Image (tube, grey):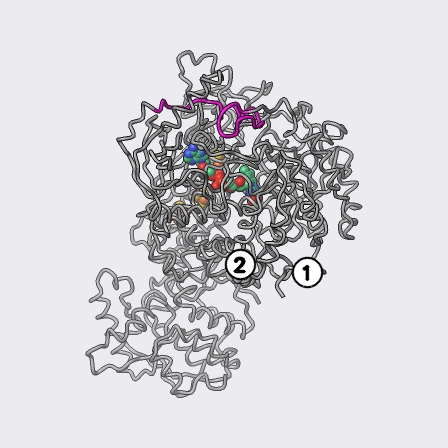
Amino acid sequence: MSDTAVVTEEVQEVKAEMVPVYIMGKRYDVPNSLTIMKAMEYAGYQYIRGAGCRGGVCGACATVYRLPGDYHIRVGLACQTVVEPNMYLTQIPFFPANRAVYDWENIKGEAEEVFQAYPELFRCLACNACTKVCPMDVPVMDYVAAIKRGDLEKAAELSFDCIQCGLCATRCMAEMAQYHIAQMVRRINGKFIAPHSEHCHKQVEAIKSGYYTDKIKEVMELGTVDPFDDSTKTDKIDKLIELYKARETEPHTAVEDWKPESDFALLK
Amino acid sequence: MKIGYYPGCTLKTKAKNLEDAAIKSMAALGYEMVELDRWNCCGAVYSLADDDLVHFLAPVRDLIRAHDQGFDKVVTLCSMCYNTLARANLLMRDDEVKRDALNDFMEEENDYKGEVEVVHLLNFIRDEIGWDKLRDAVKVPLEGLNFAPYYGCTLTRPEEVGIDSPKDPVVFQAFIEAIGGNIVDFPASQTCCGSYQIISNPEAAKATTLEILTSASDAKADALVLSCPLCEYNIGRRQDEIIKGNDKLENLPTFYFTQLLAIALGLPIEDLKLELNTNSTKAFLEQKGLPALA
Amino acid sequence: MPYPDSLKQLIKKVEETRPERIVKKKAGEEFPALSLDDRGKVLQAFHPDVKEEGRRAIEIGPNKGYRIANEMVDLLEAKSRVNPEDVDLSNVDYETDVLVIGGGGAGTAAALLAQEQGAKVIIATKLRHGDANTMMAEGGIQAATKGWKDSPYYHYLDVMGGGHFTNKPELVETLTNEAPDVIRWLLEMGCNFSKYPDGILKTMHGGGTSRKRMHYAADITGAEMMRTVRDESRNRPDDITVIEFSPAVELILNDKGHCAGAVLYNMETAEYVVVKAKSVVMATGGSGRLHVQNFMTTNHYGATGDGIVIAYRAGVPICFLHTIQYHPTGVIFPEQAEGILITEKFRGAGANLVNVEGNQFVFEREPRDIEAACIIKECVNVNKGVPTPSGKFGIWLDSPMLDAMFGEGYVKKEFPGKHILFSRFGIDIGLEPMLIYPTLHYQNGGLEFQADSTTKIPGLFIAGEVGGGTHGENRLMGNSLLDIMVYGRISGENAGKYALNGAQDGDLSLEHVAKYNAEIEAADIDGSRIAPMLLPDYTLEHVKEKQLTANYEGTMR
Ligand SMILES: Cc1cc2nc3c(=O)[nH]c(=O)nc-3n(C[C@H](O)[C@H](O)[C@H](O)COP(=O)(O)OP(=O)(O)OC[C@H]3O[C@@H](n4cnc5c(N)ncnc54)[C@H](O)[C@@H]3O)c2cc1C
Ligand code: SF4
Ligand code: SF4
Ligand code: FES
């Protein structure tokens, strides 16, 4: 194999231009092509807090920064945001937030239940600081507004990309933790508002009733191959491979109610 | 024709009957009420503190949304929303210093200086449709029924934003007349229902509500007509509790004006969302055989 | 970092061949899939797993003689982080019914089910609860929920075929039978899987599937599942306690040889704490951060194979670790996003892979190992890779053809996460293709366990990516999210029941650790290494040179 495969996470011999960044106020010179996360590591930090997925989905690495001469607060995910010269930054690895405990089994799926769990919703003044600070461009104020007016479906949709980094809660005048409220709302949406998936329940029933058991037992009987023991490649395995090859593949462009030619091992 | 429409939170939950009846009725009159794409709570209580700009953020933002969406008018139904939006709009028109501060603070939005006009649906009907036209559109005139129009405090005060003169308002009466009902004038038609005091001072709220109910029934009203979910809560939903032990008073049905409009236009009963009204209101309609020809 | 001109020129070649490729696709004419024989050949020649200098035989422990990746052997042949004699086992810091090690999807599902049996549960996890590979999964979760065209039978066949028929049949049977119930369970917990208006769950193909059975929640399926189960665990604070930033560094056995807890390391205060438990669920996930053969990885920061190391020491055998899954499509340009996964759903939806000339060279829905080997071959052997500005080679993944086939905006709507990611770099993947290369993705093998999640050690249960056998030598996309929920639930239920009914108390012991350390010495292995790794070390040489007094315990200081 050639070198193309060899690509590590570590910063390699970097020929990139060096730029100053101020990590919690202190200057370090780092290559300008790095993300904030890699730049902090380049500078000599070792992460315990503040790094999770390193792929922009876990919300562990919320970062706040400013540029000189500009009063705006800027934000980004350290693992996704490329450094800018002279940025001064800090990560906010944790921010205390109120999360209501609710009894899911007894939730009926009404907006009123969200209001009861989170009365602080009604303290929202529409200052929009939350939306401005969200690194995922989630319209936070709008989903809060949607919840207040009981439109949970809309709120679930608007908040879907939230990675629960907590930055909105750091800025909220109404002192709420928007993302926890949105989480409750999305769950209500998933269970109560989204249309019911009958076919899934049917299949669960069929399996529980033993509808497929014999057929599966038959293929299980054919056994398995031990990769380190060629003697396990028996006739039975050939039969298994035959079955595998013969299985019909649903065409790519097939419509939802496509049916295979053979109805073997299917619900009738 | 499309008109920009700001619903307000309560109309999406507890006062769906105020909203649905309006949308359907306006459709019957040839107007599509287009709900703003984005909106938040109106901010509800207007702040009394002079320099408290924070409370203007919500209503001004709603006005900006309406403007961004290309509307020069935004219609609303709830008296409280109307009041809040209209006063915020006034401030944005008249107070340059505060306007700049608010625009500066909301720098992510387009600047706004009161371009949009905030209109209560009653005024919209009066000015854009006209009473005559409305009268022509009525299929089921509400003849023989005595309706007491209740303005409360937020529709007419302060005067600069009132939908009519606070001294002698007539628009509500004209509306009732146009849909065929009898107007019942009663002294307490502009008395505050107690609104938010219900939480801090429930006794006081109860007293004012009692006054309103007494005044209306003394004037021989068959029903009260409202335009505000908060008033409906105090006067309608809590009515049983309030008149308990008072044998002079009988239950007084309460309607949103939009519901009467819908009945008069002959819309199907589902459009009224009557399940959200009080039992006495439902019973009243049944007794009168309304909506009769629906 | 938008595409530089050199790449923009090359994109023109992709655009030239696109209309014809779309016509073929619409006519149902796919690029021919490889025969099983040819699959074998390309794997033998080009898959990183077969590179002999990349692996060696383990010299100690239950699988002595087993040849697996050097990086994993280094950890298995390492001493404990803490001298077992220094740990005061008579001083128990936490006592619980069930200890779940690892707060990812498998661990959290286990905690919920254990709690439902009536057990008190502690989840000990390395980073924050939910900082895990589960959170990162995008593509989807397989389950044969559509009885009119699919069943556990076909799912079973697909899983076996994907795994080269080496999978353990009982594990596969349980996996495929339980699948629809897992979807039902998640739906009832409020998980937002994508649906049609009539309630039918949206499903698509993945590599190696015969029926469209990949369920998804937009392109953040794992995150949606993770945040749902995590949220529910937070609703049970009286029974489920989460201890964050405290990875397990050793299992504790008792004098009967049963599993009885773990030693945790508080990474923030450097304290070691003792948790006594009646049963333990091991759910520490995968090991991409070992960077086998220096490959980039899609895995989260804490994926360092700890569970394998500490359970192996306690005597649990490993299996199928001789294969590692390289995801065929990791980002290779722009460099800032390097290693980040491009979900297989793009290929599932029909996006072609094309070389520098704009030509197809592989069917886009081969199983992952085959697809990866073919990409490596195209770049390394056929020399038709696309050169990146930093001197590497990649292959085009033609996302714009999806917009062309399904309507403008399709990519943006179906893959919002990836669309945003690339747009931050000035690339619109609805209009321009993506440059990809295989990346270290999934630990196919792991600890041996049974279909009821039990192991050789009574009281120790296994769930999720840390286990081996379900997927044999190669996992199909969408079967891991399924795996972690199926075995997360089973392990939780059984660990809970065992804790309340079957567990036997005994004196706590770390003797197995002392013995293992001694074995290392006896085998004359370099004794300077310690494990588990806990976190990878990304400190650079220029820093290390100046860290004159820094004290590194393994990778951590
Ligand atoms: C980018 C990406 C995309 C993927 N896409 C898909 C997909 O579309 N479909 C699919 O089916 N699968 C997919 N997978 C695979 C799948 O997500 C994982 O295999 C699965 O989620 C693993 O779940 P788990 O609970 O076993 O491990 P994890 O979710 O990784 O959880 C393990 C947890 O244990 C913690 N931990 C580690 N060591 C210790 C220790 N010593 N002590 C305590 N805690 C510890 C970890 O930090 C982590 O929180 C994907 C994986 C990745 C990385
Ligand atoms: S909504 Fe709040 S918690 Fe969610 S991503 Fe945005 S800022 Fe973070
Ligand atoms: S920050 Fe808080 S108060 Fe401001 S708009 Fe957002 S939710 Fe409302
Ligand atoms: S580390 Fe997870 S979002 Fe950055």
* Residue B71: assigned label: 2
- Specify the segment rendered in magenta: C58-84
Chain letter of the residue beneath label 2 in the structure image: B
Magenta residue check for C67: yes
Rendered location of residue C349, percent (x, y): 67, 48
Task: Check disc 2 and report its element: helix, strand or loop.
Answer: loop
* Apparent side of residue A141 relative to residue C403 in the rendered image (left or right): left
The quadrant the N terminus of chain C occupies is top right
Height in image: A89 above or below C464? Answer: above
Left or right: A123, with A152 as reference point = left
- What percent of the width, then of the height, locates residue C343? 61, 42
Secondary structure of the residue carrying numbered label 1: loop
Height in image: A54 above or below B142? Answer: above
Rendering quarter of residue C372: top right
Side (left or right) of C146 relative to C540: right
Mark 1, residue position: A258
Q: Chain of mark 1?
A: A
Residue A24 quadrant: top left
Label 2: how many residues lie within 10 Å, few (<14), some (14-19) or many (20+)? many
Number of residues whose C-alpha sits closer than 10 Å to that of mark 1, classed few (under 14), some (14–19) or many (20 or more): few
**Three-letter code, disc 2:** Phe
Residue type for callout 1: Trp
